[in-house]
Amino acid sequence: MRTAAIQPMDSDVILIDTWRGDIVLGDDMKSIIAVAALIISSSSLNQVFQPDRNYLFSTCAKMNGYEVDKPYGTAIRRGGWTFDAKRQQGATIVLDAWSLYGDSDPNHLAYVLATARRESAGTFFPIREAPKCGSDEDCRERAIGRLLQGRANKRNAERQLKGLPPLPVSANYAKVDTTGFRYYGRGFNQLTGPASYKRAGDLVGSNLIADPDKALDPPTSARILIEGMLKGWFGSRKPVSYYLDQTQPQWTAARATTNPGSPNADITGAFARDFRKCLRPST
């Protein structure tokens, strides 16, 4: 190998392979470059994507509504949805939490916003499962009981066609637990069951077992949504980055981060695709 030496500083030498163009670095220069690369990498990893909020609210002022084309499971347009002042207020709380707990990928933020819209029945504020029941917990218990029975009926009809025995109906998680509380779905993630409440509470430093309604506090719920989705706390136990990247995002499959097997997954995916078009970095 023939080399030519250049000396950028007294303490270091860079050797350039004149046949192949390879660069061979002296020890001091290697250390400097390694430190610089680490600093750049850390800065990139820690940089949270900050959206232009005015652009988001103006560009997405009127959005599509969707329903699922049941034979195919794909979302089709039905009606519209307006990002009015009240919804913007709720979305601002989510965006504030994103600035604290989010990451650098706008695709991930788009999916956070889509999930918040979906799991809040379009309000952008955390809600209780079976929201039509309001504060009537007996109504909610009956509604969730009917939901679980319907799921069991569908599952067992499919099993019957395969010659398999039926499975029992899942326990009604809206009933009063031994703690005296009901652990039905609450918040942007619709936390369900005491194990999910404990896990989320431990991770954000809040005792949700003793106070499950704390999951309805907007900043708390937004943090659970964001950290849970980015770190893979729920659903498939995979982070949203597993499904979404900058080149081939799997918008529909990403629903598994919150609700694996959902027949309406493509609706949330369609919401996310729409939100992504309204995201650009703030200046």
Image (cartoon, rainbow, N blue to C red):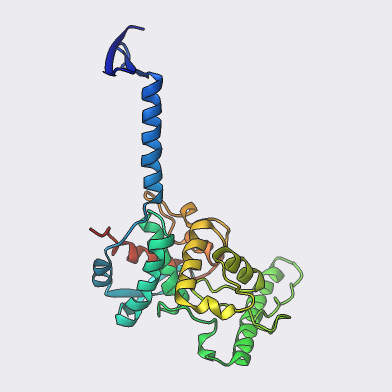
Horizontal and vertical percent for residue 162?
70, 65
Q: Residue at x 54, y 74 (%)?
A: 190
Q: Measuring from the top left, give residue 121's x and y in whole percent.
A: 44, 79
Q: Which corner quadrant holds the N terminus?
A: top left
Q: Position of residue 104 (x, y in %)?
A: 37, 53
Nearest to the observer: residue 72 or residue 281: 281
Foreground residue among 26 and 180: 26
Q: Quadrant of the C terminus?
A: bottom left
Q: How many marks?
A: 0
**Could you tell me if residue 68 is visible in this image?**
no
Q: Is residue 21 left or right of residue 242?
A: left
Q: Is residue 161 above or below residue 153?
A: above
Picture coordinates of residue 150 (x, y %)? 63, 80
Residue at 60 percent across and 65 percent down: it is: 202
**Residue farthest to the front, as pictured:** 10
Is residue 214 among the parts visible in the rendering? yes
Residue beneath the point at 47% across and 67% down: 223
Name the outermost residue toward the top: 2
